[in-house]
Amino acid sequence: MVSVAILFVSTQPAPALPLTPFRDEVQAQRHCPGDTVVWLDFQRGRYYLKGQQRYARGFNGSFVCRNEARDSGYRRSLLGLR
């Protein structure tokens, strides 16, 4: 008896998890009460914590939950951390 095993390997990256963007920090906090709300800059692909200079600034960003941002591939910005 001959056994044949076929293995399919995909070279495409896994799809990013959906983000839930909010215009208001309070709305975002209600959505993720156990998580930290961050400002996500879509153009730069970075998120900023409260207290950083670029937090809640710009027209191409939104408030999101930090874990959603991380899981979607966005990285933390180190600018303005002290």
Image (cartoon, rainbow, N blue to C red):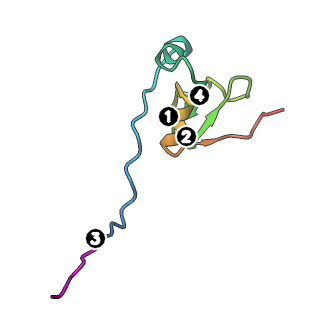
Asked if marks 3 and 2 touch (Cβ < 8 Å), the reply is no
Q: Residue at x 51, y 38 (%)?
A: 42
Of pointers 1 and 3, the one earlier in the residue sequence: 3
Contact, mark 2 vs mark 1 (Cβ under 8 Å): yes
Camera-nearest label, 1 or 4 = 1
Badge 4 or badge 3: first in the primary sequence: 3
Mark pair 1, 4: CA separation: 12 Å
Going from N to C along the chain, the mark reached first, 1 or 4, is 4
Q: Nearer the viewer, mark 4 or mark 3?
A: 3
Reading the image, the residue beneath label 3 is 8
The quarter in which the C terminus is drawn is top right
Query: How many residues crowd around disc 4 within 10 Å: few (fewer than 14), some, or many (20 or more)?
Result: many
Name which residue type carries label 1: Glu
What stretch of residues is rendered in magenta? Answer: 1-8
Q: Secondary structure at mark 3?
A: loop
Whether residue 24 sits left or right of residue 6 in the image: it is right
Horizontal relation, residue 10 to residue 5: left or right: right
Relative to residue 9, is residue 74 depicted above or below?
above
Q: Which residue is mark 1?
A: 68
Q: Amino acid at mark 3?
A: Phe
> Foreground residue, 80 or 15?
15
